[in-house]
Image (tube, rainbow, N blue to C red):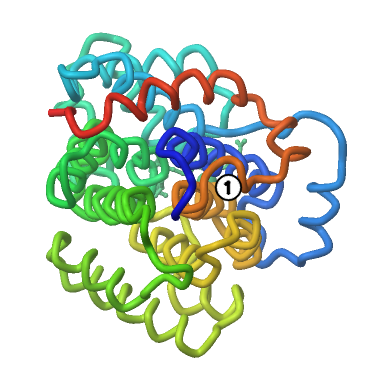
C-alpha cells in the first residue's frame, strides 16, 4: 500500500498473526462464533494470550532476522522450535508437533522425527502454515518464498499437504507484503493466479478456485467455512484464511473477525488471516488498544526492524 513503510508492513505481519491468534484462541474448536462474543473479547481488559501459532512464528522470525545473509538453516531452526515448545508446552501445541519436538529434544534428527508421525505418513496439520509468514520478508521472489515455506514446514510436517499449506500461506504473505503499489481493491483473480502458478497441486487449485467464487458471491463466514473447511488440517484451514483476507483486504480486524466467525480452528485461521491483512496494511492500521494487550508487542517491534532489512537476501 502506498505510504506504508516496509518495516511497518513486516511488523503488521507479526502483530496481525498475534492478534488473530490471541483473539481466536478463546473460540478454538467452536462450531461458529457470533460477532457479539468476539466483541466481548475485544472490549475486555487484560493480556491477550497467544498460542503455539504466534510462539513458533516469532521463533522463525527471529531465526531469519538473526541469520541475515546466512538464510534458513533447518537443523538450527528445528532446535529452536523444540526449545520454544520445551519452555512453554502449555501454549496449545498440536499433538504431532509436540511429539516431533520431544524427539528432537532427545537428539533425533528432525527428518526422522517428522516422518515417524501418523504411521509414517507424516503430518498434514496446519502447523507448518500457521507459523510460515515471516519467510515472506526474506524471499527473493514467489518461487523462493514457496521453497522457504516448504522447508520450514518439513521440520514437523513430512506429508505433502502440510507442506503445500505452508507454500500457499507463504506466497500469500509475500504478495500481501510486496505489492506496495497495489490498488486499493485487491485483484482476487490475479492473486489466485499467482498462487496456483507456484503451488502445483490440484486439490489446492480447486480450493483456491472456490475462494474466488465465494468472494464473488460475497459469502458470509459460516458459508465460507462450510465450503472451504475450518479444521486443523492444512487443506482444511489455509483456504479459509486466504478467503478471510481477500474478502477484507484493507481491514485487518475485519479479516480476523471473518476468520473467527467461521468457527473451528479459530486461533490458527485468525492468525493466518491476520498475517496477510497485517502485511498488506501495516501495523499502524491495527487498533492501538488491542496491540497494547498483546504479549509480543515490544519483541515483535525489535524483530520486525531486523527482519525488514534482512529481506531479499535469505537463502
Ligand atoms: N492443538 C491445537 N488445539 C487443540 C486444543 C488446544 C487447547 N486450546 C489447549 O490449550 O490445549 N492447536 C494447535 O494445533 C494446530 C496445529 O497442529 P500441528 O502443529 O499441525 O500438529 P499435528 O498434530 O501434526 O496436526 C494436527 C492434527 O491434524 C491431524 N492429522 C495431521 N496429519 C495427519 C495424518 N497423517 N493422519 C491423520 N490425522 C492427521 C491430527 O488430528 C493432528 O493432531 C493448530 O490449530 C494449533 O493452534
Ligand atoms: Mg494455536
Ligand atoms: Mg489452532
- Residue 78: where, in percent of width, then height? 27, 21
- Residue 232: where, in percent of width, then height? 45, 53
The extreme bottom residue here reads 217
Which residue does the numbered mark 1 point to in the structure image? 267
User: Which residue is drawn at the image coordinates 20% and 34% (left, top)?
Assistant: 312
Question: Looking at the image, which is closer to me, 213 or 97?
Answer: 213
Report whether the residue tagged 1 is closer than 8 Å to ligand 3.
yes
Question: Looking at the image, which is closer to me, 233 or 225?
Answer: 225
User: Which residue is drawn at the image coordinates 39% and 76% (left, top)?
Assistant: 211
> In the rendered image, is residue 53 in sight?
no
Q: Residues within 10 Å of mark 1 (few under 14, many from 20)?
A: many
Secondary element type, mark 1:
helix
Quarter of the image with the N terminus in it: bottom left
> In the rendered image, is residue 19 in sight?
yes
User: Which residue is drawn at the image coordinates 17% and 19% (left, top)?
Assistant: 69
User: Which residue is drawn at the image coordinates 36% and 30% (left, top)?
Assistant: 308
Question: Looking at the image, which is closer to me, 123 or 246?
Answer: 246
Residue 47, relative to residue 154: is it above or below? Answer: above
Quarter of the image with the C terminus in it: top left
Quadrant of res 151: top left
Quadrant of res 187: bottom left
Left or right of residue 272: residue 18? right
- Residue 167: where, in percent of width, then height? 24, 51
- Residue 68: where, in percent of width, then height? 24, 18
Question: Dividing the image into four equal quarters, which quarter contains ligand 1?
Answer: top left
Q: How many numbered dots are placed on residues in this image?
A: 1
Residue 150, relative to residue 36: is it above or below? Answer: above
Quadrant of res 161: bottom left
The extreme front residue here reads 3
Amino acid at each position: 500500500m502506498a505510504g506504508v513503510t516496509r518495516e511497518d508492513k513486516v511488523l503488521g505481519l507479526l502483530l496481525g498473526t498475534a492478534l488473530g491468534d490471541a483473539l481466536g484462541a478463546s473460540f478454538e474448536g467452536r462450531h461458529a462464533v457470533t460477532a457479539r462474543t468476539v466483541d466481548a473479547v475485544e472490549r475486555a481488559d487484560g493480556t491477550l494470550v497467544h498460542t503455539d501459532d504466534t510462539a513458533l512464528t516469532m521463533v522463525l522470525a527471529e531465526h531469519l532476522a538473526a541469520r541475515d545473509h546466512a538464510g534458513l538453516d533447518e537443523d538450527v531452526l528445528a532446535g529452536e522450535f523444540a526449545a520454544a515448545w520445551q519452555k512453554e508446552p502449555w501454549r496449545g501445541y498440536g499433538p504431532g508437533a509436540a511429539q516431533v519436538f520431544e524427539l528432537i529434544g532427545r537428539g533425533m534428527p528432525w527428518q526422522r522425527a517428522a516422518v515417524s508421525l501418523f504411521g509414517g505418513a507424516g503430518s498434514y496439520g496446519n502447523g507448518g502454515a500457521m507459523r510460515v509468514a515471516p519467510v515472506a520478508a526474506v524471499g527473493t521472489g514467489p518461487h523462493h518464498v514457496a521453497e522457504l515455506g516448504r522447508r520450514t514446514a518439513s521440520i514437523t510436517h513430512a506429508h505433502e499437504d502440510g507442506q503445500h499449506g505452508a507454500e500457499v500461506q507463504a506466497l500469500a504473505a509475500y504478495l500481501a507484503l510486496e505489492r506496495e503499489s497495489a490498488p486499493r481493491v485487491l485483484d482476487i483473480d490475479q492473486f489466485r493466479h499467482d498462487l496456483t502458478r507456484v503451488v502445483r497441486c490440484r486439490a489446492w487449485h480447486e480450493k483456491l478456485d472456490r475462494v474466488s467464487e465465494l468472494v464473488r458471491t460475497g459469502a458470509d463466514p459460516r458459508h465460507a467455512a462450510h465450503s472451504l473447511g475450518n479444521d486443523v488440517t492444512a487443506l482444511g484451514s489455509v483456504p479459509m484464511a486466504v478467503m478471510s483476507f481477500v474478502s477484507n483486504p484493507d481491514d485487518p480486524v475485519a479479516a480476523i473477525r471473518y476468520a473467527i466467525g467461521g468457527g473451528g480452528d479459530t486461533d490458527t485461521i485468525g492468525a493466518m488471516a491476520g498475517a496477510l491483512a497485517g502485511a498488506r496494511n501495516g501495523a499502524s492500521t491495527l487498533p492501538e488498544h488491542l496491540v497494547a494487550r498483546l504479549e509480543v508487542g515490544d519483541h515483535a517491534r525489535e524483530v520486525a526492524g531486523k527482519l525488514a532489512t534482512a529481506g531479499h537476501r535469505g537463502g
